Image (tube, rainbow, N blue to C red):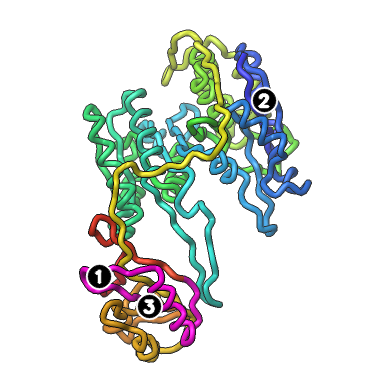
Amino acid sequence: MIEIAVAKGDGIGPEIMEAVLHIFKAAGAPLNYQFVEMGKWVFDKGFGNGMTPEAKSTIEQLGILFKGPMETPKGKGVKSINVTARKTWNTYANKRTFQTLHGVNTVFSKAGIPIDLTVVRENIEDTYGGIEHQLTEDVAISRRIITRPGSEQVIRYAFEMARQKKARRVTCVHKANIMKITDGMFLNTFHKIAQQYPELTVDDIIVDDLCMKMVTRPESFDVLVLTNLQGDIVSDLCAGLIGGLGFAPSANIGDNICIFEAVHGTAPDIAGKNIANPTALLLSGIAMLQHLGLNATAAKIENALLYTLEQGFHTGDFGDKATAALNTTAFAEKIIAHFGKTPKTGAKTAVADQPIKIEVPQLQENLLLHAKEPVTKTLAGVDFFIDSTAQPGEIAALAQKYSTADLPLINISNRGTQVWPEGSKFTVLVDNYTLRFEATEGQAVTQQTIIDLYTKLANEFQITSVETLLEINGQKVYSLAQGQ
């Protein structure tokens, strides 16, 4: 028997979880459950991270969490419990599979276009760090964090998964044409790792181009790997192609802890009515069974689900409205009744169950990911962000008093567009400027030089943020302003 942690969730979570666990029991899945307290109701009890200490300890001991949909309280300044769980336990790869389900009618199924997509989304970094500041009355910023080690983790997982499932193509989705440093790092890491998988066809595509192609010919794609925010959006787009989030499983994969969950909403308007669709949570549970080495049990349940859908059985949110909808319990019972049936399309075969033993290491300190290759880092300058409603020329006149031959004022930008020394009067300004001081070629800047310059500029401006400019191995790794 394999012990796993189970969090029932909020809203419809408890009733769809009950249905799925009932199916698991009927299928003979060798699982023991430890139920843990997580979700909105736990926030409401005063736990700011949405889970009790006992829940956290249990999950870290067992290594597997199976969870229903959870709600984050609105307007209370708390972080999403779903994102918190993924980030706390470094489940760096979010894997979502999207397949045509016969009996779930969509534009593409009606057109006879089969969909079989796997989206692997980076799960820890990007804007989901939630690091935001308001710099002025009118200007707020969000830090987008992309790291090389984090990119390597999720991209390598995508390639290993693609190799295992005998995928035909792995595509990196990005916006490196605009975000040249952050998405550029992700894209460069992808192509470097791709060299180790010569049997796979690899390519990359800009995310907006992907979205256009996804709604015109989705069958041309196979495995997609993306950064966090772009992956979140594309995942939901893909869910729409197959009938919605009610049919989209989700697995969050880490080296030590994995989370399998339904990612649709908690649907409080129908909670407790026993009419919710358990399919997404069941598909996520099937992915969990496969992860645990219970492939035969997973295939038994999935075939029964596919057969049930093919036969036209459905809950009220989908299917032929001319046939009566089943409630949650009755839908689960139909699936159980169809154990041993083979669907016409997509039938699964698997070797006998070979349960794996989950062993979570007892860590004494945090793991630090760091690039192994030695680099030379040099401070090349500094960007000062200031709060001002003055015109660019006025700001330049004040800032130039502190410009030196070694660290001159190079330019001034507003919302990323250069407004001094050259610019256009048609560039509309807001009350936050960036003053860039950049060392002359071959000169290095010290931190003390930057501190001294800060002190002087603070007599002239309200400084809202500071970013140092870095050169790595002689290459500038900071962006230019538009028009610079």
Query: On the rendered structure, is 393 left or right of 294?
Result: left
The residue at the point 33 percent across, 76 percent down is 437
Quarter of the picture containing the C terminus is bottom left
Kindly indicate the quadrant of the structure image that contains residue 322.
Answer: top right
Q: Where is residue 353 in the image (x, y as percent from the top left)?
A: 51, 10
Q: In which quarter of the image is residue 274?
A: top right
In the rendered image, residue 128 lying in the magenta stretch gets the answer: no
Q: Answer above or below: position of 388 versus 369.
A: below
Sooner in the amino-acid sequence: mark 1 or mark 2: 2
Q: Which residue type carries mark 3?
A: Leu
Do labels 1 and 2 touch, CB within 8 Å? Answer: no
Residue annotated with mark 1: 443
- Residue 70 appears left or right of 132: right
Q: Mark 3 points at which residue?
A: 435
Residue identifier under label 2 = 19
Circle 2 Cα neighbour tier, 10 Å, few/some/many (<14 / 14–19 / ≥20): many
Image position, residue 308 (x, y; %): 55, 21
Residue at horizontal 33%, vertical 46%?
173
- Choose mark 1 or mark 2, whichever is in front: 1
Residues rendered magenta in the picture: 436-465
Q: Which of 370 and 207 is in front in this view?
A: 370
Callout 3: 10 Å neighbours few (<14), some, many (20+)? many
- Residue 29 x/y as whole percent: 60, 14
